[in-house]
């Protein structure tokens, strides 16, 4: 077997040189010999591709097609394999099959110039002017890109984002203000979740080119993704002024309004757009989200169902139904989901969502083994995609403990903004934080908002643009003391848009537990509530939840257990260096003694008791988290031991948590 990556790379080059020298049979033989020496899938794919190319040049078209079929079993999204199929079918004078192959190639990778050129010729012979124009427009767009950026787009579509970033950065060093290059680098940053860099690039791009619609559209979508809805609102208005009939921008505006809590306005826009075109599944899905946030679950369910009726492999529609937590799938829906899971053309994202939805469907039917298998499949697919490294979280925790000492708070703890407005609810996802938020937001003096990204954004800024610098939290001891009050004021100003008129408001971002030291320095009078839940219940609830963003630790039983341990370690540190600053509220205690825990929280927040906090399920407000429907009902105890039905599958989690 070939173990050395450098050795296999040498073999690839040798085979390519043989093809370029028209020694096709030698190339085929050497590639087949190399295939016998490696079992790595990526190498197998590349070698089979080279075999097929050599076979086509040797006019062995049927053999080439067979080689490509073998390749596509290993990688069914290999765009160049479909392009090669197209060439072979043309040589065999099978124009219909050639067309299908080239169309599949550009569907997988819209940057394949040669496929577009062949499609234009095929469409011309069929006298299809509309298709000719569409292909010609795309081809012209590609030809206008500098060769380096065309290579970048190809790398991106092939999932080679690190290579794409290297080439794009090199190009921008030579062409500093190239807007398309800046946009591509920002898109790479978004894929790699380096959001601060992407935001900086796109805001710079629209300053340099205010009329560049694509750059502003990318910036808008990123702001929505980051929950920066006020900024997003400004950008979408500019885009709609330029293109008032653009449905995508109208839908983006509705999403922004949903984020700002203006759900009635959002629903009106979604309804208008759907009236113009009711065959786009995504519009119905987003309408469903707005209706769910408003509390109109029956209509939200209809919208989600309409989405999958339009597009049967739309995993997000099925997952959104499951994510209401109260919906029970019918037999025909379960059959349809299984059919789409088995569909080779379904995307990885759709399959992940379908697996999680199937897990919920089986769990509702008390078929716990099948449910766990579905959850496990979804988690494994998602985990393979996000490439999360739990050791980096553990390192962050150790850095917080090392640098955020009692001495730091003694010396700098008085420098922040002296206002009592924010109540932060932190902890792990699925620990009961939405319930605590709903209880507190039922008080006349408290506004509920959402999971705000502001503290995470500030921490990212303090960390520095260069990942290797790793400035934060070490720099909390060194930065100019006046910054703390400014940061606190900026937090209050930037979050005002999410508030109504109450003097206090809630930020429910669970991940803020990592930054309690930063919060204490910029907002010393803030209140922090740690929503805690027993480890097995909390971790398993997170494991069976598919999160929209930012909880990548939850897709492995080992990772989620290690994350829980790191969280407990850090919370113990905060209690040690900031005694009394954080109130721990156990979910099980809230379930057993609602009034006692409500009074305890209100006392901590210096609020008078109000009976409405005990009748939290009657409070009308927009809720955008997975538990939205659960907290619109009276408190229930059934979920506290739900994990026990799956206990036989949870040994890896128990081992990490040191539970017998």
Image (cartoon, grey):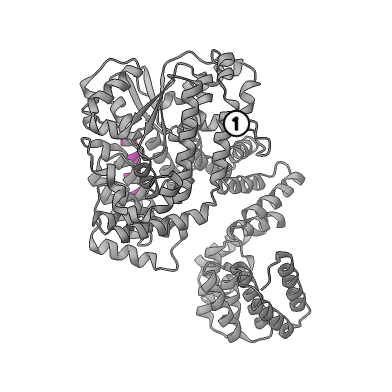
| Residue 204 placement (x, y as % from top left) | 63, 36
Q: Identify the residue at the far right of this view.
A: 21
| Residue 13 placement (x, y as % from top left) | 75, 71
Q: Is residue 289 above or below residue 603?
A: below
Q: How many marks?
A: 1
Question: Which of the pair 443/190 is nearer the observer?
Answer: 443
User: On the rendered image, what quadrant is the N terminus found in?
Assistant: bottom right
Q: Identify the residue at the far front of this view.
A: 660
Locate residue 355: give its quadrant.
bottom left
| Residue 600 placement (x, y as % from top left) | 30, 21
Q: Which residue is mark 1?
A: 461
For residue 273: magenta? yes
* Residue extent of the magenta highlight: 264-274
Q: Secondary structure at mark 1?
A: helix
Picture residue at 63% right of the left edge, 58% below the top: 155
Q: Is residue 631 above or below residue 489?
A: below
Picture residue at 66% right of the left edge, 50% below the top: 165
| Residue 89 placement (x, y as % from top left) | 56, 81
Q: Is residue 242 left or right of residue 162?
A: left
Q: Is residue 180 left or right of residue 22?
A: left
Picture residue at 54% right of the left edge, 35% below the top: 397
For residue 284: magenta? no
Q: Is residue 329 left or right of residue 208?
A: left
Locate residue 189: give its quadrant.
top right
Question: Which of the pair 245/519 is nearer the observer?
Answer: 519
Picture residue at 55% right of the left edge, 47% below the top: 389
Locate residue 461: give its quadrant.
top right
């Amino acid at each position: 077997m070939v173990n050395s990556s450098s050795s296999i790379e040498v073999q690839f080059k040798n085979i390519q040189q043989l093809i370029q020298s028209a020694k096709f049979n030698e190339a085929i033989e050497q590639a087949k010999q190399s295939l016998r020496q490696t079992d790595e899938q990526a190498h197998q794919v590349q070698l089979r591709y080279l075999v097929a190319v050599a076979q086509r040049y040797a006019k062995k078209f049927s053999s080439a097609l067979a080689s490509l079929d073998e390749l596509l079993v290993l990688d069914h999204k290999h765009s160049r394999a479909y392009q090669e199929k197209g060439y072979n079918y043309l040589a065999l004078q099978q124009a219909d099959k050639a067309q299908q192959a080239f169309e599949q190639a550009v569907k997988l990778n819209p940057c394949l110039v040669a496929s577009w050129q062949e499609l234009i010729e095929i469409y011309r012979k069929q006298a299809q002017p509309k298709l000719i124009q569409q292909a010609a427009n795309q081809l012209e767009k590609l030809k206008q890109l500098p060769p380096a950026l065309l290579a970048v787009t190809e790398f991106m579509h092939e999932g080679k984002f690190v290579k794409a970033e290297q080439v794009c950065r090199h190009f921008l060093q030579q062409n500093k203000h190239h807007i398309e290059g800046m946009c591509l680098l920002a898109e790479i940053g978004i894929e790699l979740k380096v959001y601060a860099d992407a935001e900086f690039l796109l805001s710079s791009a629209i300053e340099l080119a205010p009329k560049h619609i694509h750059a502003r559209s990318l910036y808008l979508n990123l702001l929505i993704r980051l929950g920066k809805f006020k900024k997003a609102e400004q950008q979408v208005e500019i885009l709609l002024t330029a293109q008032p009939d653009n449905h995508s921008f109208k839908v983006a505006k509705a999403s922004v309004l949903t984020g700002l809590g203006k759900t009635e306005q959002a629903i009106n826009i979604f309804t208008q757009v759907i009236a113009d075109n009711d065959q786009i599944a995504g519009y119905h899905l987003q309408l469903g989200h707005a209706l769910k946030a408003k509390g109109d679950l029956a209509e939200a369910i209809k919208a989600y169902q309409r989405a999958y009726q339009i597009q049967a492999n739309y995993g997000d529609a099925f997952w959104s139904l499951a994510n209401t937590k109260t919906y029970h799938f019918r037999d025909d829906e379960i059959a349809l989901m299984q059919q789409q899971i088995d569909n080779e053309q379904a995307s990885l994202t759709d399959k992940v969502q379908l697996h999680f939805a199937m897990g919920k469907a089986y769990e509702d039917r008390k078929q716990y083994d099948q449910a766990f298998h579905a959850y496990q499949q979804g988690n494994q697919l998602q985990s393979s995609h996000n490439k999360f490294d739990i050791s980096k979280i553990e390192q962050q925790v150790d850095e917080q403990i090392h640098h955020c000492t009692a001495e730091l708070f003694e010396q700098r703890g008085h420098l922040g903004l002296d206002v009592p407005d924010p109540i932060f609810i932190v902890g792990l996802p699925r620990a009961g934080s939405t319930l605590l938020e709903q209880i507190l937001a039922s008080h006349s003096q408290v506004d509920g908002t959402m999971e705000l990204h502001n503290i995470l954004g500030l921490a990212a800024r303090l960390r520095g643009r260069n990942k290797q610098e790793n400035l934060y939290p070490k720099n909390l001891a060194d930065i100019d003391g006046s910054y703390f009050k400014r940061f606190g004021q900026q937090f209050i100003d930037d979050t005002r848009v999410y508030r109504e008129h109450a003097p206090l408001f809630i930020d429910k971002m669970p991940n803020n537990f990592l930054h309690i030291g930063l919060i204490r320095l910029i907002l010393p009078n803030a209140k922090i509530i740690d929503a805690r839940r027993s480890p097995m219940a909390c971790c398993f609830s997170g494991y069976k939840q598919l999160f929209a963003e930012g909880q990548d630790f939850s897709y492995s039983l080992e990772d989620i257990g290690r994350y829980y341990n790191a969280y407990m370690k850090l919370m113990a540190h905060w209690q040690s260096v900031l005694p009394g600053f954080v109130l721990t509220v156990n979910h099980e205690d809230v379930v057993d003694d609602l009034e006692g825990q409500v009074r305890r929280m209100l006392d901590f927040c210096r609020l008078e008791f109000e009976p409405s906090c005990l009748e939290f399920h009657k409070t009308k407000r927009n809720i955008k988290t997975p538990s939205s429907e659960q907290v619109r009902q009276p408190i229930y105890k059934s979920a506290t031991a739900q994990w026990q039905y799956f206990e036989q599958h949870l040994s890896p989690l128990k081992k990490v948590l040191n539970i017998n």
